[in-house]
Image (tube, coloured by chain):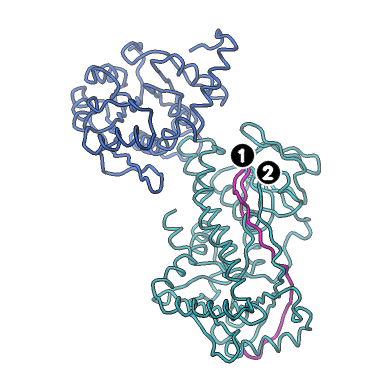
Chain colours: A cyan, B blue
Amino acid sequence: MKYEFTIFGFGISAKITSCLLARNGFSVCLISDKDQKQEISNTNLVTFLSRGSLNYLSSMFPKTKQFEEHPEIDSIHCELNSLRGNKPQSIKFNDGEKQNLGKIVKNTDLEKYLDQEIGQLRNINIIHGSYPSMVENKKDEIKLKLNNGEEIDTDLFIVSSTKNNLADLISIDFIKKDLKKSAISIDINGDIKNANCAFQKFTSDGPLALLPYSKNEASIVWSLKRDSKLLHKDNEELLQIITKHLSEQVSSIKMTSNEKHKLQFVYAKNLVYKNTVLLGNIAHNIHPIAGQGLNLSIKDIALFVNQIKKYKSLGYKLNDQMVLEEFEMKRKIDNTAYSFGTFLLDDIFSSNNNFVNYTARTGLGLVEKIKNLKQLFIRSATGEDFYKAL
Amino acid sequence: MDISSIDKTEIDKFKNLAKEWWKHDGKFKTLHKFNPIRLEYIINTIKDHYAIDKKNGLPLKGLSVLDIGCGGGLMCEPLARLGAEVTGIDALEKNCITAKIHAEENNLDINYINTTAENLNKNKKYDIILNLEVIEHVNNPKNFIKECSGLVSGNGIMFIATINKSIFSLIFAKFMAEYVLGFLPKGTHDWNKFLTPEDIYSFFIQNNFDVISDTGVNYNPLRDEWFMSKRMDANFIVSGKKN
């Protein structure tokens, strides 16, 4: 079969990309890397969707009412508490006239919504539970051979899955690092004092985030060193410790689920190789500390789709190398800054070195005091400027 | 242009030339960077003029285009891909063969002829004529435009793109582009032959055309990007409709 776009993966990025391309009239083949029975991921992970990402998604998917009831996050509060004897240094990010910075959305909700969208689009063909075992670059197209023997010709091949060592087949170099950290992801319900505030406390064990996605439900993500004893506490004990840390934010909370995830750092040196494009976590799997993972991917996808649409209307080929290079170049600075920035932030805030710790506190204090600097961070994190320029 | 009679070693030479023309970061890098902006203005003007609102498929189907001084076919191919029936002419035979080979490699049916506007058969008229970055190289622009005008069908449009005769263009389009930035080979342009937008308007009017619109095409060196603007003191494009 011949398609204009073939997308490998079945996560949020793969789904958004296939919906957007199919909506614009392109023929899309979506190869799911999951078994059909397990296609709805069973995870309690949540995502911070910045105002820019939310606005973009709702302009592309006008029917989306799904997230209307989620509380708007209008401030992000960070607290650094790791030096003994000192009073906590804190910083609050908000956007002037009490504007929405974004919303916390459960990944499964987002996926379910995208599944409905995909179901309505006729020009997406889904191949379930498969993967490419051979990728052949021809002059103007790519030939894929799937593990089930099926052959696919495609103008552009989009990789959005980290499975099956596909990286070996596509000649793109990655920087990978095991962060030697794990995150506990806990779902809670109970009394949340301010459901419009995302709270992050830099404890001596690692950053602990409280992310409310409804008036009485929130996700708690605690990034810990892999040898941390906290990873082995039972639920009750863990809840007690957390309640103590978040005593000013929550009360009488119950744990509804508890998962552990290894934190990996992945950064692709290129987004494009010939007619292959990387979109999603495979391009930059970053530390959750700034909640920017999916937002970065949505920016990549938005620019990619825009670029393809624009140049198609000017009579260019879908896989024109100049067009793909322009896409890659335009996303480079943002992706690099966030990838290595969050990596660094995590290192700084989890450091036990007094000097580093002191510097971090001073830095936070400075950001808190210098209004313009703070505004700069907010503008970048909400994605406002990016989507305006699109 | 018929390339079936050319011998194989010659064809290989032209294939390499085609590669050179179409390498977006090679010798013709500036032209490739510049191309999307020209195309955007030209396609939008065509769509407005012929009231085409089709976004997908072949929006330019049914329209005939003549590209004068087509070079390697950088304008011809995108327009053919959008459905137009394209003819490209060039005074250099090697450009025509090169362009033909590249079009065939891309399964595009484009008619390339090794000739000049003056010598082209005047019986066939075209809906759209592209006269891009050519007029500053001809000896008698007034006569040249008159010849080109005879090739445009009634209610058809002609685009003329060139470089303004201004101090700005002397410094940037001539001196900087050729001697400092190396965008163009030295000696590409003769500033004395540059024409002002007013010259172009008057050519249009003399040949019974109405000017539809114009745009400046400018370069931002910091972002390495070309963009359209009202500033017409260097590169600019004017479009006219034949009455």
- Of helix, strand and loop, which one carries label 2? loop
Query: Given the image, on which type of amino acid does mark 2 rest?
Result: Ser
Q: Nearer the viewer, residue A268 or A47?
A: A268
Residue A215 screen position, x and y as percent? 57, 81
Task: Name the residue located 40 percent from the left edge and 24 percent from the top edge.
Answer: B65
Placement of A161 over or under A258, stated as above or below:
above
> Where, by quadrant of the figure, is residue A373 drawn?
bottom left
Task: Name the residue located 74 percent from the left edge and 37 percent from the top edge.
Answer: A151
- Of helix, strand and loop, which one carries label 1? loop
Q: Chain of mark 1?
A: A
> Where, by quadrant of the figure, is residue A314 drawn?
top left
Residue A342 screen position, x and y as percent? 58, 67
Which residue position holds label 2? A171
Q: Magenta region's main secondary structure?
A: strand
| Mark 1 / mark 2, whichever is N-terminal | 2
Q: Is residue A302 magenta?
A: no
Query: Given the image, on which type of amino acid does mark 1 rest?
Result: Lys
Q: Residue B228: in sight, yes or no? A: yes
Q: Chain of mark 2?
A: A
Which residue position holds label 1? A274
Task: Name the residue located 69 percent from the left edge and 55 percent from the top edge.
Answer: A10
Residue furthest to the top: B5
Q: Nearer the viewer, residue A180 or A3?
A: A180
On screen, residue A76 versus residue A372, left or right, reads: right
Q: Nearer the viewer, residue B150 or A279?
A: A279
Alpha-carbon span between mark 1 and mark 2: 9 Å
Residue A143 screen position, x and y as percent? 70, 36
Check whether the beta carbons of the residues at disc 1 and disc 2 lie within 8 A of each other. yes
Placement of A81 over or under B174, stated as above or below:
below
Q: Which residues are magenta?
A: A251-280
Residue A188 screen position, x and y as percent? 67, 81
Placement of A233 over or under B232, stated as above or below:
below
